[in-house]
Image (cartoon, coloured by chain):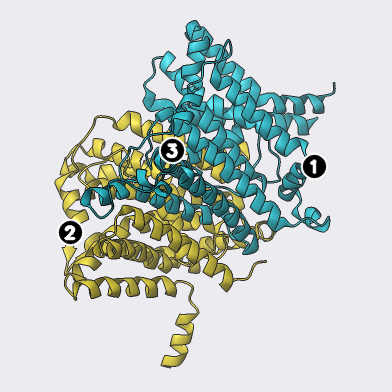
Chain colours: A cyan, B yellow
Amino acid sequence: MNGASLARNLRMLLPAISLVVLLVAIYALQPRAISYVGFNLMLNLAIPIALATIAQMCVITVNDLDLSIGTYVGFVACVGATMLTGGVAALPFVKDLQASGALPAVLPWIMQTPLAGVLVLAFGIVIYAALGALIHWRNLPSIVVTLGMSFVWLGLSVLILPVPGGQAPAWIRQMMTLKPAFIPFPIIAAIVIAVIAHVLLMRTSYGAVLRGAGGNPRAIERAGWSLLRVKAAMFALAGFFGMLAGLSLVGLTTSGDANIALRYTLLSIAGVILGGGEFVGGRISPVGAVMGAATLTLAGSMLSFMRISPDWQIGAQGAILIVVLAARTLIDRAERSR
Amino acid sequence: MNAAAFLRRLAGRPWLWAYVAAIAVWIVTILFTGGRGAGEVLTAAFTFATFSVIVGIGQMYVVTLGPGNVDLSIPATITLAGAVATKVMDTQDGMILAGLAVALACGVGVGIVNYALIWLLRIPPIIATLSSSFLIQSTAIAYGRGIRIKPPPMLADFTTAQVFGMPVLAICIIALAAVMELVLRRTLYGRWVTAIGQNIRAARLAGIDVGRTRFAAYVMSAVFAGLCGYLLSGFSGGSSLSMGEEYLLTSIALVVIGGSSVAGGNSNVPGLWGAALFLFLVVTMLNTYGFGAGTRYLATGLIIIAVIVAASARRPAR
């Protein structure tokens, strides 16, 4: 193997190396953490973060950035904790109307069906697709558009659920607390997420077109593909994974809150970058992104094993990000100097 | 200059619309109250707009540098500077200037770290300021936990003082904005920033020290964030861990609504004031009409999107 390909392999393996280093460090500090129960506890919250990271990755693939993913995940969680459980009747303001006598105590079937929640969530994905189309059509800066959307999702969440509460549907709660034999559920979920995203984006022919729209949009356009449709598809995909993130999150927390996932916006960007993705050019790695999300989640556990105050959790995530980026820069330099 | 020509020149200014919208919203608000409280609404608008304008100026200089340039570390810097400054001042009036110096020094430090990351790691500014903001936020949380120190009385008085219903602080920041507009338009440095935003290669070939100009812009943005944290801790009776939170989105929103180009190379300072007043007045209006927090967020978001779509119609896509 010559130097250049060694450097390339090293860069590809960087996300896995960082994750393994972190796991080894945790094992050294607290051997019992590397167990079935330990992984369940440490990686539970990695599932929604990994899904949000994949969502962010879809947007980054087409050279955009989604600053609204955090509030969108919160919105899905709020819908999940209300309308997906008890339909329109589960909304707090409907309950208020019932209490004041404006609505009858027993509501008709149409207002109690969880179908309303499904429709609202599907509507969310449609909005995402429309945003992608709008951003491409008007050549808008995605940062600003999604910044505006972050307020919109937050506003909708607060309208749906003014105070934290509600209840997640039983089937989601059961799914998130599955206890399969031998392998902890979060690990299985992470592998499934990574494989699906990998196959979808890296192994299908349309996936290559989707990534190509980030790498060389003109070539894709010349080849007869509609960039508008590609962008709408990528944003819709982001909306879909973001929805899964919100649903899995509400399954873990069992109740909804508009502010539940504000930090996901920045975490998801960090996860994509940690996983070896690049900001422009459609160069992404779904498997790396899931590992990046797991690394960021484990950073918190590692601190508590080191008996460092959780105040430093965000700082540790920032430090990991900087160290990995520095390592990548060093590898790039080594590659170029050869 | 005759009136017609003046009006035509005014209408060509991208920042005009922010003021027009602000005044329109103000009128709609006082229509509801029948004219009562019109002055108080304006006083409050100027008071709260001041803080977002301070960080907006720094963010605007960074955004002017061109696509991809944005400072995400502003909220963390505000929080850190506020916490450190209140601790240094420790309610002593005599330490006010020392507190200011420390807050500004925090800004200089953050700015240097931000640019060092951009330069050394060759990473996009968004990622650099994102990762540094994680570190700064953590430092601020660890440092500021449990301390609730009141600001020195003189600082608290200064930040809440008014002359004829106009906050003194707002007057100072209007003056600051005027100076920064002059820096942008009339000094070599301002021209450099604009030139880099328009075409970084051309700027480099023209002999501009691109690195140093960008470095100065990032330091300036962080210093303004430090200043904002210092004044905010004086205004709100001490620093708190979430005091910077809202200013990330607000600072970017001001730049956009104020009529500056998000792609860089074409910015203006007056629009920041118009946009800040507009955003606050919208919230006041919705409050007056009895809408809740959810509707206010929704309206703010839709306004930002509407403004950016309208701006793209004004400047057709390349």
- Dot 2 alpha-carbon crowd within 10 angstroms: few under 14, some 14 to 19, many 20 or more: some
Please name which of the two marks, 1 or 2, marks the residue nearer to the observer: 1
Foreground pick, A321 / B35: B35
Left or right position of A215 against A184: right
Identify the residue at image location x=52%, y=64%. B308
Q: Position of residue B275 (x, y in %)?
A: 39, 65
* Whether residue B82 is situated above or below residue B159 in the rendered picture: above
- Report whether residue A42 is seen: yes
Which quarter of the rendering shows the N terminus of chain B?
A: bottom left
Circle 2 sits on which residue? B161
Foreground pick, B148 / B174: B148
Circle 3 sits on which residue? A261
* Whether residue B176 is situated above or below residue B149 in the rendered picture: below
- Dot 3 alpha-carbon crowd within 10 angstroms: few under 14, some 14 to 19, many 20 or more: many
Q: Quadrant of residue A273?
A: top right
Disc 2 versus disc 3: distance between alpha carbons?
38 Å
